[in-house]
Image (cartoon, rainbow, N blue to C red):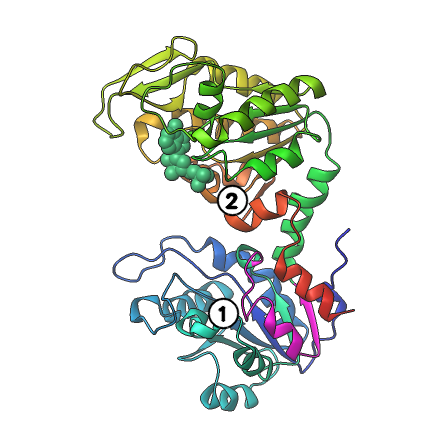
Amino acid sequence: MINKKFIEEINLKGKHVLTRVDFNVPLNSELKIMDNGRISAALPTIRHIIKHGGKVILMSHLGRPLGERVESLSLKPVADELSKILGERVYFIQNCVGEVVENKINSMQNGEVILLENLRFQKAETMNEIEFCKQLGKLADVFINDAFGTLHREHASTVGVTQFVDESAIGYLIQKELQFLGSNVTNPKRPFTAILGGAKVSDKIKVIERLIDKVETLIIGGGMACTFLKAKGYKIGASILEEDSIDYANQLIRKAKEKNTDLLLPIDGVIADHFDKNAKTSIVSSEAGAPKGWFILDIGPKSTEVFCKAIQSSRTILWNGPMGAFEIDKFSRGTMKIAQSLAEATSKGAITIIGGGDSASAIKKSGLSERISHVSTGGGASLKFLEGTMLPGVNAIQQSNL
Ligand code: AMP
């Protein structure tokens, strides 16, 4: 049981509330924000602090500037967008620590909002350097973490800072993420189906190990399924393969049988003569396999049907990782059908959870996000959490409140 403080337990009136958010939004070459989902996801926490008379000091990273100021990665456009959707003035400061920041913060009124400059313009942020943590802590009485996407990182703004403030707690977004990825997975409504896809088996072994004891059905698709097909002795042509994981795939096939867990692998696939949008394609059964030089780049229609049937008869469904190379339309059909099937299952009362990353992009692309119970805002963090790993950001808050 994760026992951490929640924002509602803290008296915020008149306090400087340093709030870590995840404003790592996609920008185009004109620095226009292409998707403001991460900004709106932080609104409940920001509004709560304003309503309770706190002074809101927001901090975030954006992209990977590697410890130097990179103009195209300034958070200034985010401050403008936040101001628009919040309906309040948002002051932007071109640094995240130091005298200018401290002076501005000392003159703040209750309910005012400030956004600091990109934390990763400072090397000390990702190195969790103690002096930088102290400087951040100096800005605040209270620290709130609401950046789910960086909870698995041991950085100054997610871990170190908690040592230098009076109180620390999590915000609404993290609370919601932990609830969906936590109790709904530990204590699911049954039957429970997990769908895993994406490129690599090795990235997902720990998640598989945790889920295999909890689910009735485990579906494996995407590039990672090729290693399982190879383990079964099928031909996979030039498809993505992790030789080192073939033994593991065999063990898992055996383990699923012992535990009476339905392990569903693709029974057919879309194969292509190139990994390219202009490739020649064909549909083959997994048994027939892919010829030499060909790639399996999506699940086939029969697999889709079997997978969707399992989804429709489940009451909890967790999905992490696309069923194919969905960035290319030709190979996106399987992924999109799974997305649709999850939306339908939600309408029938199932709890549907998407673990961030590429499956979250796929659901956005399909326009069905609103029809899913929960789409996680953090790919890496959600995977770590699903593995059962204690996230450093949560641990730091717990420790600081002991
Ligand atoms: P991951 O980051 O491990 O979730 O993997 C996501 C990536 O896996 C996406 O970029 C997909 O294009 C890729 N992917 C999915 N299926 C395949 C496949 N059959 N062959 C190659 N890449 C794939």
Residue stretch in magenta:
151-170
Q: Is residue 126 shown in magenta?
A: no
How far across and how far down the image is residue 252, in percent?
60, 25
Q: Quadrant of residue 219?
A: top right
Q: Is residue 20 visible?
A: yes
Residue identifier under label 1: 127
Q: Say above or below: 355 vs 307.
A: below
- Classify mark 1: residues with Cα within 10 Å, few (<14), some (14-19) or many (20+): some
- Horizontal arrangement in the rendering, residue 152 relative to residue 226 (left or right): right
Residue at 21%, 27% (x, y): give it.
Answer: 278
- Horizontal arrangement in the rendering, residue 239 relative to residue 39 (left or right): left
Q: Which mark is residue 356?
A: 2
Q: Say above or below: 235 vs 92.
A: above
Which mark is nearer the camera, 2 or 1?
1
Total numbered labels:
2
Q: Quadrant of residue 47?
A: bottom right
Q: Amino acid at mark 2?
A: Gly
The Cα–Cα distance between marks 2 and 1, rounded to whole angstroms, is: 25 Å
The kind of secondary structure element at disc 1 is loop
Residue lying furthest left: 278
How far across and how far down the image is residue 264, in percent?
56, 19
State the quadrant of the C terminus. Answer: bottom right
